[in-house]
Image (cartoon, rainbow, N blue to C red):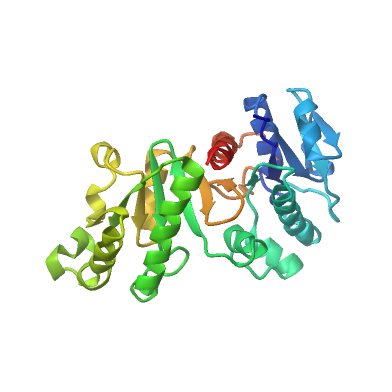
Amino acid sequence: MTALAPIALTCGEPAGIGPELALAARAALPDLPFFWIGDPRHLPEGAAFTAIRAPAEAAKVAADRLPVLAHDFAGDRVPGQPDPRNAQGVIDVIARAVALVRGGEAAAVCTLPIHKKALKDGAGFRFPGHTEYLAHLAGDVPVVMMLASPLLRVVPATIHIPLAEVPQALTEALLEEVIRLTAAGLARDFGINRPRLAVAGLNPHAGEGGAMGREEITLIGPLLDRLRAEGLNLSGPLSADTMFHARARAGYDAAICMYHDQALIPIKTLDFDGGVNVTLGLPFIRTSPDHGTGFDIAGQGIARPDSTVAALRLAARMAEARRAG
């Protein structure tokens, strides 16, 4: 079997910690083929890199040098201070990485953090974030956000909305789509033939028989019964406060949660530095470190690369699983 194509690592926001993370990831993963797409001027002074003309050349670059597919930006890099002139370049790099993957020149996309306000201010970026833009590039396909680590995988059914709006946003159609996309993604990209999904309730104690809310009785429970009848391996609705201890986690492959913090608090508590953001439902593989741009520490050389390293490793494993399937 031929070797996998290299992974495309996008530059993210130049003023953030992305350039430093790319170099640190290369040092940590000298044998994992990947290349960084960005402006070489944005790398830290003295950075060891080799310019490549095509992704295939990444495998030939010395292990102590970062393979760079150059993409010219309009502005320089000032750590901690986003330059509006660079906004369009950030967006274009993401689109370029996707095109390389869809064209077979890269195995996956791993995205370094962007700053959404900077993109909106500098280029009129109209998407809430990476995930929505990637879904648009794929043809406006439905997607879900998974946070994954060796200890836990979680998928929030609703994401960046106020908690007060969750009950209205949590429809049967939405929850069914999230469950189906998660099951399909675990099978295709993680090699899990019949994924076990644990589904949380919305209310404390999963509503406690209606005493603390009725969404589990009127919406979540009936939907799970219908999907179980189709053959999906589902448990729930479960009380979220007992879903995430070690013995409970051993009983499922991913947890479906009803809102942002219900999903992200447990994974960030268990594995703050090693969590990876995965977009399921795309026709290509996308991972990302689970943190932001780190403007407050950019340029200081102290950013931890753990999540970026984990994201690159997971992208490679997912690409292998997708190829094997």
> What residue do we see at 70% from left, 53% from top?
98
Q: Is residue 46 visible?
A: no
Where residue 257 appears, as percent x and y from the top left, is 35, 57
Query: Is 7 placed left or right of 237 in the picture?
Result: right
Is 114 in front, or is 91?
A: 91
Is 220 in front, or is 37?
A: 220
Q: Is residue 276 visible?
A: yes
In what quadrant of the picture does the N terminus appear? top right
Instruction: Give the number of callouts.
Output: 0
| Residue 104 vertical position relative to residue 61 in the rendered view, above or below | below
Query: Is 312 placed left or right of 243 in the picture?
Result: right
Query: Is 275 placed left or right of 170 in the picture?
Result: right
Is 126 in front, or is 143?
A: 143
Query: Is 212 placed left or right of 100 in the picture?
Result: left
Q: Residue 110, located in which quarter of the rendered image? A: top right
> What residue do we see at 36% from left, 44% from top?
253
Is 178 in front, or is 76?
A: 178
> What residue do we see at 38% from left, 53% from top?
263
Where residue 112 appears, as percent x and y from the top left, is 64, 47
Where residue 208 appears, as percent x and y from the top left, is 14, 63
| Residue 180 vertical position relative to residue 162 in the rendered view, above or below | above
| Residue 295 vertical position relative to residue 166 in the rendered view, above or below | above
Where residue 266 appears, as percent x and y from the top left, is 35, 47
| Residue 193 vertical position relative to residue 227 in the rendered view, above or below | above
